[in-house]
Image: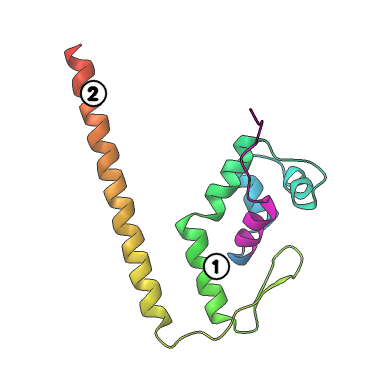
Amino acid sequence: MLNMKPHRIPPQVFFALCDAAGLKSVDIARKLDVTRAAVSQWRSGVSNMDDKNYQGLADLALSSECRFVALYRAANQPDGVASPEDGTLLLTQGTPADYPQRVARIFQAQLSEDIASMARAVTAIMEDRRENAHA
């Protein structure tokens, strides 16, 4: 049997998404409850992230807030969005005239999904509590 590790998206991809949203290493460190030095070491590849911090970075970079701010910045800066860390540009290509309406629709769809997910979670919690009350 082959011993294969699942492929991981490189952390630099998540750092780039955070950069596009304007998050600095100090902001990421605060959100992950680590030092800024640790984040700098991860960014530079000096040290590897443990699974908990990798998941935290992925969750942060892929959060609705981060995605929408990055999209907004990219659409409103036609020459590219500069990274707050090293000035690297996230380049964009022409923004369609209906961009604000598209973002609003995407945000509404995401919000609807988030609300539906919360409703399912609350339902599961309530069912679990009922079962435990009868046990």
User: Is 117 on the left-hand or right-hand side of 29?
Assistant: left
CB atoms at circles 1 and 2 under 8 Å apart?
no
Q: Tell me residue 32's x, y (percent).
A: 61, 42
Using a 10 Å C-alpha cutoff, classify the residue at mark 2 as few (fewer than 14 neighbours), some (14 to 19) or many (20 or more): few
At 57% from the left and 42% from the top, the residue drawn is 55
Q: Tell me residue 65's x, y (percent).
A: 47, 59
Which numbered disc flags the more N-terminal residue, 1 or 2?
A: 1
At 75% from the left and 40% from the top, the residue drawn is 48
At 79% from the left and 41% from the top, the residue drawn is 47
Seen from this angle, which residue lies furthest right? 46
Q: Identify whether 50 is placed above or below 1.
A: below
Q: Which residue is mark 1?
A: 70
Using a 10 Å C-alpha cutoff, classify the residue at mark 1 as few (fewer than 14 neighbours), some (14 to 19) or many (20 or more): many
Q: Identify whether 56 is placed above or below 24.
A: above
User: Does the stretch in magenta take in 75?
Assistant: no
Q: Amino acid at mark 1?
A: Ala
Mark number, residue 4: none
Q: Which SS class for mark 1?
A: helix
Q: Is residue 92 visible?
A: yes
Q: What's the magenta region? A: 1-19
Q: Tell me residue 17's x, y (percent).
A: 60, 61
For the residue pair 9 and 47, the one nearer the viewer reads as 9
Q: How is the image coloured?
A: rainbow
Q: Tell me residue 133's x, y (percent).
A: 19, 16
Q: Is residue 31 visible?
A: no
For the residue pair 29 and 8, the one nearer the viewer reads as 8
Q: Which residue is mark 2?
A: 129
Q: Identify whether 111 is placed above or below 129.
A: below
Q: Which SS class for mark 2?
A: helix
User: Is 120 on the left-hand or right-hand side of 107?
Assistant: left
Seen from this angle, which residue lies furthest front? 1
User: Is 67 on the left-hand or right-hand side of 123?
Assistant: right
